[in-house]
Image (cartoon, coloured by chain):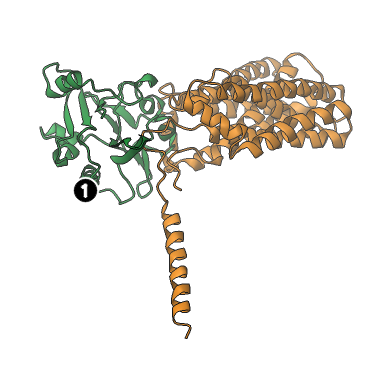
Amino acid sequence: MEKQQEHWGSLPAWYLFLAAMGTSMFIIVAVTDMLGNQISAQINGWVSLVSFAMSSVGAMLLMLELTHKTKGYLIIARPFASILSFGGVIQSLYIPLVLVYASFFFNFIPWVGLVWLKMIVACLAILTGLLYVSYAGIELGEAKGRAFWNGGGLTCLFLINGAATGMAALILLMIILGYDGQAYTLAIKDLSVALLIAQAITVPGYVLGMRLSSAEEARQGADKLWRGDLSRSFWVGVITLGTVVPVIINLLFSSEYSLSLSSALILFGGIFFRVDFLRAAVRAALPGEERDEPSRKEIVELAATLESRWQEKARWLNRE
Amino acid sequence: MHWGLLINLKKCVGCQACTIACQNENALPSDLKYCKVAKVGPHGRYPNLTSYNITVGCMHCEDAPCVDGCPTGASHHRVDGIVAIDPEKCVGCLFCMLVCPYGVRQLNDEKGVVEKCTMCCERLDEGRVTRCVETCQLQARLVGDLDDPESEIVKQIHKQNAQPLYHHLGTKPSVYYIMP
């Protein structure tokens, strides 16, 4: 039956995932740099470039979702008119700032020695990055008719998951760059375990809270995740493979392979988390809307079935 | 001046004349409806069954989430309270469709822009009533100025205790319903 509920496709979910992952990864290494950790000089350039690439790909995915892509600039033409345009402006500031920050770590760049300038750029990029990862939860909260997104904890969930995926991506990058045995990598691993434990409590907690909500549409959305059509990807993808299994792996093992596996699983769970939470929120059904209308495709299929049934009957009647 | 619509569900028989007239007025493709008619019920237990028809279009909310959420300003309030869409500014981000609690916005695939009921603002500007009001044979629909306490629509709203749909969402709709 034709679904009368509108929702974004999977491209915005990928955008949210890539933006949160890339930005969180950057914030971690930029803060590490500001704290004076020596490893920053070796990794921050590459990590920032990857963060730049992630955020840019995410932004391009969002542009692909527009029906009039050439008019996409209009989104930032009124910077504070809506939360979406605010996000667009923040994104437009963050992406070049990260690229500029990355440039301070490559010796062929003329301004590589200007540490004070690098710190200013880092501060600005961290600030815009924090706004960038936070605004998604606020943006979804704008949908008054979709009570599943109206919970105050949604932004926190997005921040926790974003930070966990950022750490997972950072660990993978550290392994690729050959820093897997470093104390810094192991510290990030321990932090990610703490975040994943928080995620294992808060994500089902949020869904359970919504199941007990007074708003019918919030309960419907939560039920889709708890035991409905999204329950498999939620319980298997987000909770089991994306949260619990990586915690167990990270607590029991610390080899390069186990770190890679757990990080890949966290990223896998992060994608499912964004897709599931975008799809779960249903709008308050209007009176009479529960009567689903057949879609054109279903009418065509029904007509084809009827036609073949008629043909069968005709053959049976004319078999002599 | 604040245009509003009153729909009397006690009179509506679900003939869909308003839907067709609206499609004609706005030259819409057959699968695009600014004014949808749905049958509610039957509810209850035999022989005490209730069933009625409801027409749903844009509610032209005073505190419209679509206007607040539109990043380009394509969705906007006219001075007379009608929520309008500027197709030149619409980039098709579909955020307004997502935040509209009534689900009345639709993407016109041919034009690539989001569309919805305009409350026939051109007709109202010319001093005529909306096409759906003009078409409804049972006079189940009434358009008027919600700011004028002497207008027929305001009198009927008070007399019949008409209510908007889902007013608890706080969007302050300009479309009122007389429930059966």
Q: Quadrant of residue B55?
A: top left
Question: For this view, does A110 lie left or right of residue A277?
Answer: right
Above or below residue B77? Residue B97 is below
Above or below residue A298? Residue A244 is above
Query: Which chain can be seen in green?
Result: B
* Residue A267, image x, y percentages: 71, 35
- Look at the image and tell me whether residue A31 can be seen: yes
Question: For this view, does A128 lie left or right of residue A316?
Answer: right
Q: Quadrant of residue B133?
A: top left
Colour used to depict chain A in the structure image: orange
Question: For this view, does B118 lie left or right of residue B134?
Answer: right
Helix, strand or loop at label 1? It is helix
Q: Nearer the viewer, residue A270 or A56?
A: A270
* Residue B165, image x, y percentages: 32, 26
Q: Quadrant of residue A181?
A: top right
* Residue A304, image x, y percentages: 45, 65
Residue at the disc numbered 1 = B24
Q: Nearer the viewer, residue A77 or A307?
A: A307
- Farthest front residue in view: B47
Question: For this view, does B105 lie left or right of residue A10?
Answer: left
Amino acid beneath label 1: Asn
Above or below residue B27? Residue A5 is above
Q: Nearer the viewer, residue A182 or B38?
A: B38
Q: Nearer the viewer, residue A301 or A77?
A: A301
Q: Chain of mark 1?
A: B
